[in-house]
Image: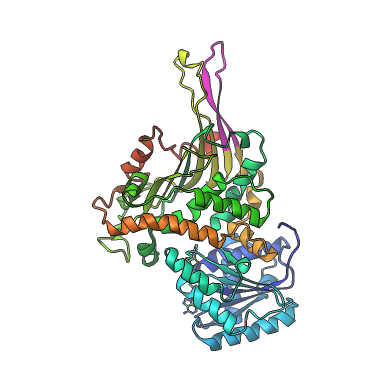
Amino acid sequence: MTTNETHTSLIMIFGATGDLAKRKLYPSLFHLYRKGKLADKFAIIGTARSPWTHEEFRANVKDSVLTALGSNEQIDDFASHFYYQPHDVTDSESYIKLRNLAGELDSKYELQGNRIFYLAMAPEFFGTIADHLKSDGLTETEGFKRLIIEKPFGHDLESAEKLNAQIRQSFAEEEIYRIDHYLGKAMVQNIEVIRFANAFFEPLWNHRYISNIQITSSEKLGVEERARYYEKSGALRDMVQNHMLQMVALLAMEPPIRLSTDEIRSEKVKVFRALRPIEGEEVNNYFVRGQYGPGSIDGEKVEGYRNELNVDPQSNTETFVAGKLMIDNFRWAGVPFYIRTGKRMTAKSTKIVVQFKDIPMNLYKNNHDQLNPNLLVIHIQPDEGITLHLNAKKSGQNMQTNPVKLNFSNEGSNGINTPEAYEKLLYDCLQGDATNFTHWDEVALSWRFVDKISEVWENTTSSTFPNYSSGSMGPDDADKLVEKDGFFWWNVTDLDVEDCK
Ligand code: NAD
């Protein structure tokens, strides 16, 4: 569903003093407000432990918007819609106060009983909050009720199932919006358009013409202050179970019969069902784990993971994963999808490289000319765009070839107005459009896949950790994983949009 209608709603943010709310949610809400996409009839209740007043909260909201966007036009009016209620998530009395405030704001702003509950808090509270929202009467409302839930959704399939069963006591599946913020990114949303709106891609989008697909999501940052969470999660749970597998699903799915939430989700689910399960001894043939050691990033020396704050000096947690995924269906038989993601790598970059097969006969090889494979590169972040790598004739009398790049940079055309992922996702939720959120079936199948890998890794201590230097592109074994199939990782920094202009 996509309409330009604005909806009136109360948005209740749990964890309103937290990092996510400050850095992402308030600036995104402000953008929506400035664009006229939030009706005048909206109110936000922030809740957290801090004993703030409404005024203190508004000052904080203004500060976060000014820091993120440097804008102050209409900021006072925007902030006047914000209310604060100190809260303890386990205490019914807190919820009753929230319910009363919600009721007052409902009348004041004529919100028609529409309520969005945004859980921007540590995941151990998700289930408890959902329970209280129902038992303390906050979900008893005449309008819609929707629950936005942050990642991670569970720690493995078992805990995700438990959490899901608990939340489903208070909200129906179609009222649950599980955030995967990659699905809000402009170029991730573009994958479907590139595939299904271009006559020259879709006919080639299969095992006959594509040799392999590579998805890299690399960060320069280390674990920062997140070690308490990350030590238990690692890159596999933090990045692969959700973001990486979601990108694979969008790249691999069959064309949906229409662009409705249900149809798109059902095609994505089929991809997860076709994913070859990797388990037991096979895990080390298909997956490589890594942990960063000391090294240098942008010329500055940095510590290894085991020396970071709150990290066990013997930690077995992976900060890097490379994997080869096989999708066992007609379209993708034999085509590897390589994924790799990690911290403290050479560059901050998320890119998809679709490598096409070589043409059946290279007429130019006789001229000692190596034809470069055709590539479609989708730049997800920080650059946004598409690059097509082709071969063309060199200028002059000879018939030698030259690689050329056709480049579309999203930045150049509408970059200034490219909304943040969170802005898009908040707007989608206001519209009742759950397409870019993950359905339970997707979550369950991706945990089932990932659990088999973590089971092996958790039961065998890596003897090689740390096995890549900070500032590199990961362990050598990640290169070997691809090389044994006759391929190599495309260097993400060589593929940057700027290099292609
Ligand atoms: P945070 O630690 O900065 O904030 C947590 C918030 O919860 C604070 O407002 C705190 O007051 C509140 N809180 C904690 N215990 C409470 C209790 N007992 N009762 C009431 N309030 C309580 O966390 P964050 O970084 O904002 O992350 C929130 C969620 O968003 C997490 O699920 C995280 O995984 C997810 N997330 C965060 C980011 C990010 O950029 N920060 C990105 C992606 C996902």
Residue visible at 32% across and 42% down?
477
Residue 388 located within the stretch drawn in magenta: yes
138 vs 210: above or below = below
- How many circles with numbers are drawn on the protein? 0
- Nearest the viewer among 297 and 270 is 270
- Nearest the viewer among 90 and 15 is 90
52 vs 39: above or below = below
Q: Quadrant of residue 319?
A: bottom left
Please give the range of residues in magenta: 387-407
Residue 56 located within the stretch drawn in magenta: no
- Residue 430, given in percent of the width and then of the height, sits at 68, 66
Whether residue 301 appears in this view of the structure is no
Quadrant (top left/top right/bottom left/bottom right) for the N terminus: bottom right
145 vs 72: above or below = below
Q: Quadrant of residue 440?
A: bottom right
Left or right relative to 78: residue 340: left
